[in-house]
Amino acid sequence: MIADGNGSNDVDAMDDQWPDDFVVNDRTCIVTREATDPSRLIRFVRAPDGSVVPDLKRQLPGRGCWISAERELVDRAVKRKLFSRAFKSETKAADDLGALVDRLLVADLAGMMNMARKAGQFVSGAMKVDAAVRSGAAVGVFHASDAAADGVRKIDQARKAWKFGTDAEHDIPAFLLLTGAELDEVMGENAFIHACALAGQAGEGVVKRANLLEQYRKGGLPQTKGVVDMPKP
């Protein structure tokens, strides 16, 4: 769906109650009215029919607004009709917009996992994950959320051993975002119980998207400032 072509720049939602000295920033959340790291924001655009469209890739043309990547804030924007204020025009936001964004984030993560696998930067299987963690090649660990506790525990032990042995500031992040059945649905034959992303552009892209999805669902800061903060193998 193509965004409304009226205006080419992103805009902040500013209602009449905003203070006069508020500094306008094109990366300001329309709900919290706080400027934040662009990597922690989701862009939305207004389609020609007046509906709100999430623009995760930030590529749709036209006027855009931003919300911090938290489900509660997206739901609040819908309830308070903040998109109409942001776009200075009547705008229709679906009641299930928050759920739609979640599905899109999951699809984006799954697509990046498949891309990283093709690049040799995403592996699955408990033994391969354990070896990658202990060698320092892993930049993120993934488990099905209903994986057996013993399997998760063993890989957690490897993560702790790596951190202790390298005196690293950050843990290798671990994510339990989807059940086995959900992974089957979105990953198909590439579904896994235990997996990890490896160092490299594609692998780091997986961790970035996993951080965003986790932040969206739970709120707050991601597990690590970024894989660039982690020691290299």
Image: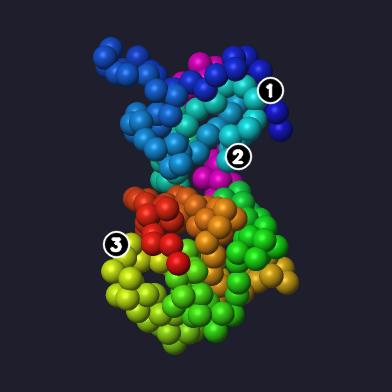
User: Residue at the location (39% across, 62% down)?
Assistant: 231
User: Residue at the location (70% across, 28% down)?
Assistant: 2
Q: Quadrant of residue 16?
A: top left
Q: Which stretch is magenta? A: 83-102
Say which element carries label 1. loop
User: Residue at the location (62% across, 22% down)?
Assistant: 62
Residue 48 got which mark?
Answer: 1
Whether residue 90 appears in this view of the structure is no
Q: Nearer the viewer, residue 82 or 79?
A: 82
| Front tag of 2 and 3 | 3
Across and down, in percent, residue 214 comes to 45, 56
Q: Name the residue carrying label 2.
A: 57
Q: Check disc 1 and give the amino acid type.
A: Pro
**Label 2, label 1: how far apart the Cα atoms are:** 19 Å
Query: Which of the marked residues, 2 or 3, is nearer the chain's N terminus?
Result: 2
Query: Which of the marked residues, 3 or 1, is nearer the chain's N terminus?
Result: 1
